[in-house]
Image (cartoon, grey):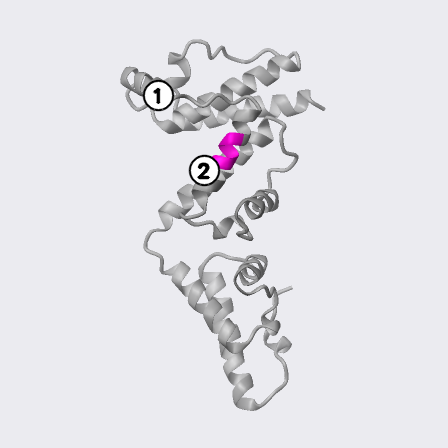
Amino acid sequence: MAETLKSLPRGKGKSNYVRAHLYRAVHAAIRANGMDDDDRKALQQQLFGKASLSDMSDAEISMLLNRLNKDRNNKAPAGHRAHVGKIRALWWSLYWLGEVESSDERAISAFVKRQTNVSALRFVDHRTAPAIIEGLKSWLARVGVEWPSGDLHAITAARHPGYSPAHADRIAVLRALGARLGEVGIPADIDLGELGQPCAMSIEQLDGLIRERGERVRAGRK
């Protein structure tokens, strides 16, 4: 439940007025950032070790507000979204391969915290994202995903205009999913042995194929 003005500690009028103003400003800032109350608590825990506003001093709440406003005014959110999207995509790959049981945000955030001590996925920035991404790619490599070498990518890109690292990563995951289907006795829907076929697909088509194969892998393992 969100902390409200009713949860303010009793005290002198002026002190209570300042705190009420800080509470309002914090809640306005989390709404502006598209955050919910659980996100706010996770950020407070990360910054101050205190999930409740009532446990924080006025100075700490002011620091929290400055952080929230800084995040909102960040002029380069696209890079952050790209990092977060990449982490989610890799986690979903593990999910479709049957290596993790949950694909929800809490499961991803638990992994992020183990890797970096950042309390939630939404707080990952450009400094911590590479370690998380490499950790996930290493995990996927251990369970059968063969990431393409730089040389192979360059050769394929020369043959297929529009081919990108995003295509290469998805095709690697598709191959691993095809192998998993074989392990549970389910024939793959298409043969990826002919490299040109998936290279001609759009990213959206590849994502759809990953989802279809992943659903069949997970169903076959039950």
CA separation in Å, label 1 and label 2: 19 Å
The quadrant holding residue 186 is top right
Whichever of labels 1 and 2 marks the residue nearer the N terminus, that label is 2
**Closer to the camera in the image, 174 or 131:** 131
Main SS category, magenta section: helix
Q: In which quarter of the image is the N terminus?
A: bottom right
Q: From where the camera sits, is residue 151 visible?
A: yes
Q: Which stretch appears magenta?
A: 134-138
Q: Mark 2 points at which residue?
A: 86
Q: Mark 1 points at which residue?
A: 153
Question: The disc labelled 2 sits on which kind of residue?
Answer: Lys
**Closer to the camera in the image, 209 or 110:** 110
Residue 16's disc number: none
Residue displayed at 61% across by 69% down: 3
Residue displayed at 54% across by 13% down: 189
- Residue 17 % position (x, y): 52, 84
Q: Quadrant of the C terminus?
A: top right
- Residue 182 % position (x, y): 61, 12
Above or below, 157 against 60 in this view is: above
Say if the magenta span includes residue 204. no
SS label for mark 2 = helix
Neighbour class for label 2 at 10 Å: few (<14), some, many (≥20)? some
